Image: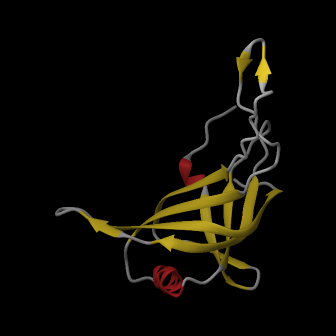
Amino acid sequence: MAAKTGRLLVVKQNTTGTTYAVVGAARSDSITINNETVDITNKTSVSSGKAYRELLEKGGVQSVTLEVEVVHNDSTLDKLMQDRALAMTHHTYRVEVPGDSTAAGGYFSGTFVITSAPVSGGYNAEAIRTYTLESAGEVTFTSSTVS
């Protein structure tokens, strides 16, 4: 499988209806699928004389975390993200994931809330804002050609 460049992984925010725009001035984007587990280990959880942990299949809560690191600026999209963080409101986002002939590309889509939006900057560097978004409902994956 050929390596893919990181710039092909893109977080987009729903701006109006079915229109999505790249989160402005993004430097890096990431998506994490989180699966909490439900431990059902008990006194009979023994195999070959050893006790092993047992987990309930599909028993825990699933969530998705997005992180977007942007060069902090006065763009309309950066302002929109900041306003959404301050309002603590839910909005639709899409994460485009590159694929190739052996792995499905496509996009994750769902409702998220911005849970963190710190701004940082070094003495001789640009100001950076890192948005952390947490899913607020079901997140779906749609296979498609994303290049």
Q: In this view, does 7 lie to the left or right of 94?
A: left
Quadrant of the rendered image containing residue 15: bottom right
Q: In this view, does 25 lie to the left or right of 3?
A: left
Task: Please name the residue shown 68% across and 59% down the image.
Answer: 63
Q: Which colour scheme is used?
A: secondary structure
Q: In this view, does 92 lie to the left or right of 103?
A: left
Residue 39 percent coordinates (x, y): 72, 42
Residue 9 percent coordinates (x, y): 61, 55
Is 136 rendered above or below residue 28? below
Q: In this view, does 95 lie to the left or right of 122?
A: right
Residue 36 percent coordinates (x, y): 68, 50
Task: Please name the residue shown 74% across and 59% down the image.
Answer: 107
Query: Which quadrant holds the N terminus?
Result: top right
The one nearer the camera, 131 or 25, is 131
Task: Please name the residue shown 78% across and 27% down the image.
Answer: 45
Residue 139 percent coordinates (x, y): 75, 63
Is 97 rendered above or below residue 82? above
